[in-house]
Amino acid sequence: EVQLVESGGGLVQPGGSLRLSCAASGFTFSRYWMHWVRQDPGKGLEWVSRINSDGSSTSYADSVKGRFTISRDNAKNTLYLQMNSLRGEDRAVYYCVRVGDFWSGYYDYWGQGTLVTVSS
Amino acid sequence: DIQMTQSPSSLSASVGDRVTITCRASQTIRNYVNWYQQKPGKAPNVLIYSASSLHSGVPSRFRGSGSGTDFTLTINSLQPEDFATYFCQQNYGTAPTFGQGTKVEIK
């Protein structure tokens, strides 16, 4: 059974940092592109970042570029999101998602999400 | 970024009704549209990919159509478990983007 389990969310002050982790199991993690998608509670979905299967290529939404860093450890089957210089508008549930098909880009598995709250 | 304008933002329907949700892209995106269903407190689940392909395990009452800039999700014979929020997503541009969502409520 495919599972994605996020951790690392919590309350942080503006300007602070958090590192999210996503532990993957039930599939060959190293074969899949992975993304982070966030959702402000009660609102819409926003793509945050993506990384290719071997970790050599990454990209970011303009809203987080220069502040967030996506990475992965294929030996540990884990995806990461390092978030620095956090702002109030970064408050959201962060989902780790697997790309089911490269061309269509649909997300076939989602984690349960981890809530990040940025407040003083 | 490519904008996805989804409508309506909410609708009320009865069990057995046919429901139609639309998404319009700000530029042509061929068939690079996916549809998701989200229930309260849960992560989204994919329903349709590549505009019209039904994901494994999704009931056949869900149907996707469209290409270019205009896309439609149709739910035939709405069931009690279909009351949820639906999102479209485009994967044509450099950054994936989502529609604002459509909440389907019980009339």
Image (cartoon, coloured by chain):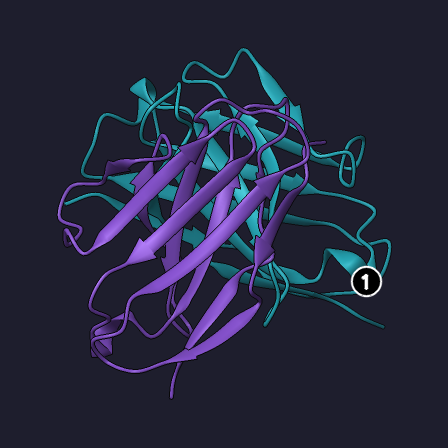
- State the count of labels: 1
Residue under the point 52% across and 26% down: B68
Residue under the point 53% across and 11% down: A56
Residue A28 horizontal/vertical position (percent): 23, 25
In what quadrant of the picture does the N terminus of chain B appear? top right
Residue A87 horizontal/vertical position (percent): 83, 56
Q: Is residue A81 left or right of residue B14?
A: right
Q: Is residue A12 left or right of residue B59?
A: right
Looking at this view, is B46 or B29 the one in front?
A: B29
Residue B84 horizontal/vertical position (percent): 38, 71
The answer to whether residue A11 is above or below residue B98 is below
Q: Which residue is mark 1?
A: A88
Residue under the point 42% across and 47% down: B72
Label 1 packing within 10 angstroms: few (<14), some (14-19), many (20+): some
The answer to whether residue A19 is above or below residue A93 is above
Q: Amino acid at mark 1?
A: Gly
Residue under the point 48% across and 75% down: B11
In what quadrant of the picture does the C terminus of chain B appear? bottom left
Residue B82 horizontal/vertical position (percent): 28, 70
Q: Secondary structure at mark 1?
A: helix
- Asked if residue A112 shows in the view, the reply is no
- Asked if residue A72 shows in the view, the reply is yes
- What color is chain B drawn in? purple
Looking at this view, is B89 or B15 the one in front?
A: B15
Give the letter of the cyan chain. A
Marked residue chain, label 1: A
